[in-house]
């Protein structure tokens, strides 16, 4: 007999559910992307004496890469543990709460660090908290949202990402210019914005009979691509597209400062992010809902990845500030559509309802790890290929291959 916690959801979630879900993601993205885009690179550069920007990016990339290893472990581990958590508060809520507290506390301490080792340790802890929190929160889509609503609901992951990025950048550049206070403000906002979801959304309790065993726990981390090919193709597509996006955006500040040599790279970055944000919001919500309505996912994912490739090629061959704004809009349109529809697609190719959290945790690795390692490898690519055009070409190649990887999927249209 299927328990309530494992049953396939059929009842539509309410507008209130979506509102607190989106609010939680707004706090999460502000706390995660603002450091990546600005606070961390500036903090790392302050510890170095060299004027070589490539060396500075490599230092940031090493720290980011170490944190990426933590994400590689934390995502599937948290997902697997939350799948079998029998707390009276539900399967997911204890992990959402614990992840938010770890994430927030680590950010608060990170702002006080004055050494590269300290920055590396506490950013790794912060990203671990981010993974614990988001692994459990993402699993609530499969737990509680019916298939015909998942594209629209998933759009409320990506739309807050765009809004959170611009709000976070404005917060730490215009309102709070002190580094330590900037990190602390992000930490406080994170916790405050996650709390409504914890308080208002019910989480079905898993019976004690379904407790996790070590044998099933260890065996569950291997998902055979031969037995579950659609899961494998979806994972491969997500890895490639996210590498494409990460290569196209990870060094955007350095591209503006050293590639295009703009007078105000910080201000230009905020304006580019604003353009990107508008198109991400429109694409994620409108196209996610359209995908639900017509019952198709693959064509949307294919076109979304292809648009990102076109945006990257535009930056590679027409390096101009005006063209960069056009590319930002195109990238936002493609990535916004990809984030919402691909998330819905991922929930439909999961092998087992017992392991939704773990399987989505594996899927989420494909989002977090490319973002973490892109600065390091991006700097190496720029140095090896003598400039940014080579980086953007590789971004386009990765996105194109990611688009092609969705074509063999058969269980979802």
Image (tube, rainbow, N blue to C red):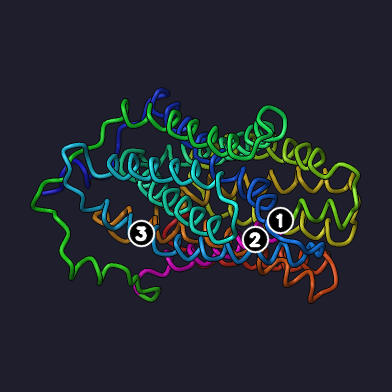
The residues colored magenta run 227-249
The residue identified by callout 2 is 60
The residue identified by callout 3 is 359
Could you tell me how far apart the alpha carbons at marks 1 and 2 are, in whole angstroms?
Answer: 8 Å
Secondary element under disc 1, as helix, strand or loop, is helix
The residue identified by callout 1 is 45
Q: Are marks 1 and 2 in contact (CB under 8 Å)?
A: yes
Secondary element under disc 3, as helix, strand or loop, is helix
Could you tell me how far apart the alpha carbons at marks 2 and 3 are, in whole angstroms?
Answer: 30 Å
Quadrant in which residue 363 is drawn: bottom left
Q: Is residue 347 above or below residue 94?
A: below
Kindly tell me whether residue 283 is visible in this rendering. no
Mark 1, other Cα within 10 Å: few <14 / some 14–19 / many ≥20: some
Specify the farthest residue to the left. Answer: 209
Q: Residue at x 52, y 65 (%)?
A: 66
- Name the N-terminal-most of marks 3 and 1: 1
Q: Main secondary structure of the magenta part?
A: helix
Secondary element under disc 2, as helix, strand or loop, is helix
Mark 3, other Cα within 10 Å: few <14 / some 14–19 / many ≥20: many
Q: For this view, does 392 lie left or right of residue 37?
A: right
Q: Position of residue 26 (x, y in %)?
A: 52, 34
Q: Position of residue 138 (x, y in %)?
A: 40, 46
Comparing labels 2 and 3, the label whose residue is closer to the camera: 2
Q: For this view, does 333 lie left or right of residue 349?
A: right
């Amino acid at each position: 007999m299927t328990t309530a916690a494992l049953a396939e959801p059929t009842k539509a979630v309410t507008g209130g559910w979506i509102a607190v879900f989106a609010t939680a993601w707004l706090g999460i993205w502000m706390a995660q992307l603002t450091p990546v885009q600005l606070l961390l690179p500036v903090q790392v550069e302050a510890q170095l004496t060299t004027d070589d920007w490539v060396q500075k990016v490599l230092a940031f990339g090493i720290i980011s890469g170490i944190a990426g290893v933590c994400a590689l472990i934390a995502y599937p581990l948290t997902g697997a543990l939350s799948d079998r958590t029998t707390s009276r508060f539900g399967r997911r809520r204890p992990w959402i709460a614990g992840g938010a507290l770890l994430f927030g506390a680590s950010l608060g301490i990170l702002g006080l660090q004055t050494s590269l080792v300290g920055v590396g340790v506490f950013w790794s802890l912060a990203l671990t908290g981010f993974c614990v929190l988001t692994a459990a929160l993402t699993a609530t889509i499969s737990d509680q949202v019916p298939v015909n609503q998942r594209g629209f609901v998933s759009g409320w992951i990506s739309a807050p990402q765009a809004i959170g990025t611009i709000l976070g950048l404005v917060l730490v550049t215009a309102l709070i210019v002190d580094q330590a206070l900037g990190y602390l403000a992000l930490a406080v906002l994170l916790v405050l914005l996650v709390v409504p979801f914890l308080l208002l959304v019910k989480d079905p309790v898993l019976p004690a009979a379904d407790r996790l065993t070590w044998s099933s726990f260890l065996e569950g981390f291997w998902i055979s691509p031969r037995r579950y090919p659609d899961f494998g193709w979806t994972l491969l597509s997500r890895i490639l597209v996210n590498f494409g996006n990460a290569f196209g955006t990870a060094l955007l500040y350095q591209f503006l400062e050293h590639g295009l040599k703009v007078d105000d790279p910080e201000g230009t970055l905020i304006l580019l992010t604003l353009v990107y944000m508008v198109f991400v919001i429109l694409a994620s919500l409108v196209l996610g809902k359209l995908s639900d309505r017509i019952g198709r996912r693959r064509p949307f994912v294919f076109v979304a990845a292809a648009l990102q490739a076109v945006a990257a090629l535009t930056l590679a061959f027409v390096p101009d500030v005006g063209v960069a704004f056009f590319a930002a809009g195109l990238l936002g349109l493609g990535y916004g559509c990809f984030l919402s529809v691909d998330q819905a697609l991922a929930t439909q190719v999961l092998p087992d309802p017992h392991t939704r959290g773990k399987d989505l945790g594996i899927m989420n690795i494909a989002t977090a790890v490319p973002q973490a390692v892109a600065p390091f490898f991006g700097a190496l690519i720029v140095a090896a290929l003598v400039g940014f055009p080579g980086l953007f070409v590789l971004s386009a190649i990765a996105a194109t291959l990611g688009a092609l990887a969705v074509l063999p999927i058969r269980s979802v249209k």
